Amino acid sequence: MARTISYITGSELLSLKERANVAIVDVRDEERSYDGHIAGSLHFASDSFVDKIPSLVQAAKGKDTLVFHCALSQVRGPKCARRFADYLAQGKNDAGIKSIMILERGYNGWEASGNPVCRCSGPTCTGSLGAKRNIPILTKPYVGLKSSTLNLTKKCVIM
Ligand SMILES: [Zn+2]
């Protein structure tokens, strides 16, 4: 039973990610450590990917959709997605995974479209995409807003 692999765009992924059953699998190699990554993504480098498929199945437990990407999703991403589909097709471990997808244009396209990226370091990403989009981004604009509100109040008083 071979699974089909389909492509998904960054904006489709953003809306899909609000559902908890999606795992994003980053198969870039060393670039992940200096280029940032999609928040909450799992890292399974392409150079050791095949050996680690069983641990990926473990890590993706409870998810039914896996979205693969590399830097551009032209070579490594599709290749690893295919390997993963083949593995599942052998029936060793069904794991409840229903769809396998590839993120169009990869991480570079994701970042170029202005989508949120995470730059945490460490083996497991602690960021999350969706509901908990976080505070640091809000800090500066908020201060700006406050001072312009103050100016406005001043002007009103003078008038
Ligand atoms: Zn992270």
Image (spheres, grey):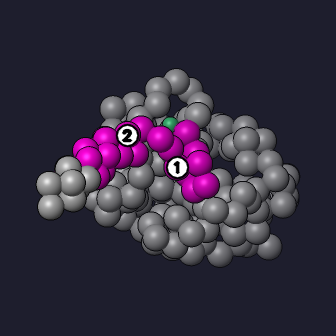
Q: State the residue at coordinates (28%, 59%).
A: 112
In the displayed structure, 47 sits above or below 85; it is above
Q: Quadrant of the N terminus?
A: bottom right
- Contact (Cβ within 8 Å) of mark 1 with mark 2: no
The type of residue carrying mark 2 is Thr
Q: What range of the chain is rendered magenta?
A: 127-151
Q: Secondary structure at mark 2?
A: helix
The verdict on residue 149 being magenta is yes
Relative side of 96 to 59, left or right: right
Residue 4 rendering spot, x and y as whole percentages: 65, 75
Quarter of the view holding residue 95: bottom right
Question: Along the polypeptide, which appears first: circle 1 or circle 2?
Answer: 1
Residue 121 rendering spot, x and y as whole percentages: 47, 26
Q: Determine which residue is flagged by label 2.
A: 139
| Front position among marks 1 and 2 | 2
Q: Secondary structure at mark 1?
A: loop
Q: Which mark is residue 133?
A: 1
Q: Mark 2 near ligand 1 (CB under 8 Å)?
A: no
- The CA span between labels 1 and 2 is 13 Å
